Image: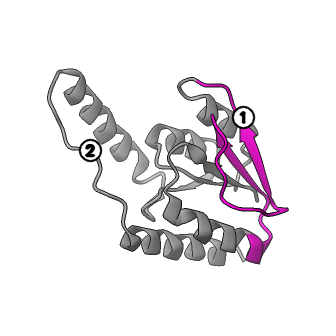
Amino acid sequence: MTLYIDGDALPNLLKPILLRSIERLEIPTRVVANKRITIGDSSHVEYLIVDQGADQADDRIVELLEPGDLVITADIPLADRVLSAGGHAIDHRGDRYTPDNIKERLALRNLMDAIRESGEITRGPKAFTAKDAHAFANQLNRFFQERR
């Protein structure tokens, strides 16, 4: 299994959590972004920088992904593509994307995009907190324990 990290919007609070898991479990990891994103030094981590542009990092992750790989992302369309390719995905707040919930989340995301495009002002996501980081760490640990 390879761990892919969609680095474009990765909260800083998650970096030490991810690095500890990567080191402890010796997980091959690729951080993919359109600029240098560092989660820390590890012989298990490879940094891939892609061209600027919409979905460049997403396309690269899906291109490299093999069934059973895990992707850390808050990007719902990317998570949908990952699941369709046989991979697994967890968002930054510790929610696991599944075949049972991804279509609903994608539809809600698309609805909110349409509302914003119509000129409606909507609130952005709530601020990322230590509680979110804790929920992420718990979900990540559960995922790896299931794979043992």
The reply to whether discs 2 and 1 touch (Cβ–Cβ < 8 Å) is no
* Residue 15 point in image, percent of width and height: 59, 63
Residue sitting at 59 percent across and 71 percent down? Answer: 17
- Amino acid identity at mark 1: Glu
Q: Residue furthest right?
A: 43
Instruction: Tell me which corner region of the image, top left, top right, bottom left or bottom right, holds residue 107.
Output: top left
Residue 132's disc number? none
Q: Which residues are magenta?
A: 23-52
Q: How many marks?
A: 2
Task: Say which label, 2 or 1, has the lower sequence index.
Answer: 1
Q: Marks 2/1: CA distance? A: 30 Å
54 lies above or below 93:
above
Q: Nearer the viewer, residue 87 or 27?
A: 27
Q: Which residue carries the number 1 mark?
A: 63
Q: Is residue 112 magenta?
A: no
Tag 2: amino acid:
Gly
Q: Quadrant of the C terminus?
A: bottom right
In the rendered image, which residue does mark 2 sit on? 124
Decide: is 44 above or below 78.
Answer: below
Q: Residues within 10 Å of mark 2 (few under 14, many from 20)?
A: few
